[in-house]
Image: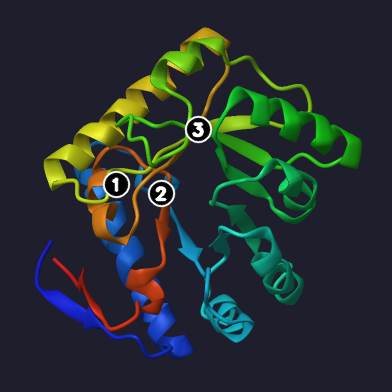
Amino acid sequence: MGRMEIVGAERPRMEQIRERHHRLLRQLRTVAERHGHDPARLHIVAVTKTHPVQLVRDAAAAGVTRFGESRVQEAEPKIAAVPEAEWHFIGRLQSNKVRRAVRAFTVVHSVDSLELLDRVDRIADEEAVAPRVLLQVNISGEATKTGLSPGELERVSAPAAVPLVGLMTIAPMAATAEEAHAVFARLRTLRDELEQRLGFRLPELSMGMSADAEAAAAEGATLVRIGTALFGPRGGTLVSSGP
């Protein structure tokens, strides 16, 4: 989308987070609109895994309202520190962590099997909570990734206790831009087919990270999981800085 900016490994200040979040959201929504999607539906989930509680507080003060974590134990003190935020679980959900996860998180992106969906639904009902749930789909069929196969979506039925709101996927790590577009477009098609079969809307598509966020926005992502481009990696990386 334009020239590139180095994002260093040092912890960003609150104003830096505010500026990066505003810029990235503007850019991704511009891409979404250019490709015929409603830009207002696209949101950034700020991934704070491995970062300290104080960074989460700074990000919340900077106007970030959605945070993503991939480990329940690491997330719990952050959620306690910023309970007003919308917390998204984006990692591999182990069966023995389901109860803690449904208590703690507003949205669970990574329900990667029909058995796990049943367990989440049952435990959420026992706990009298209703986190929004997305099914993780392994579009590329990589052995290193979990997720339902596209064919398994034909066996999905609406859970009783938790709202099923969409699908999630992860593009292959070394995917080209064209390959990422193809993966994300396929997820959108699978979502549309599942909506038609189930008879209700699945408004959320969780796809894209810092490296492939633009491809995800172009293909209709509503939740883009951004960590590096907001908070910096170890050592520094290149991220888009403007059209």
For residue 217, the mark is: 1
Image coordinates of residue 61 in percent, x first then y, are: 58, 81
Quadrant showing the C terminus: bottom left
How many marks can you see?
Answer: 3
The crowd level at tag 1 (other Cα within 10 Å; few <14, some 14-19, many 20+) is many
Q: Position of residue 21 (x, y in %)?
A: 39, 71
> To which quarter of the image does residue 104 belong?
bottom right
Q: Quadrant of the N terminus?
A: bottom left
Distance (Cα) linking label 3 and label 2:
11 Å
Residue 22 appearing in the image: no
In this picture, residue 131 sits left or right of residue 70: right
Q: Give yes or no for contact between labels 1 and 3 (Cβ–Cβ under 8 Å).
A: no
| Circles 1 and 2 in contact, beta carbons < 8 Å | yes
Q: Amino acid at mark 2?
A: Leu
Task: Determine the CA span between mark 1 and mark 2.
Answer: 8 Å
Q: Secondary structure at mark 2?
A: loop
Residue 42's disc is 2
| Mark 3: amino acid | Pro
Q: x and y percent of residue 238 in the render?
A: 19, 73
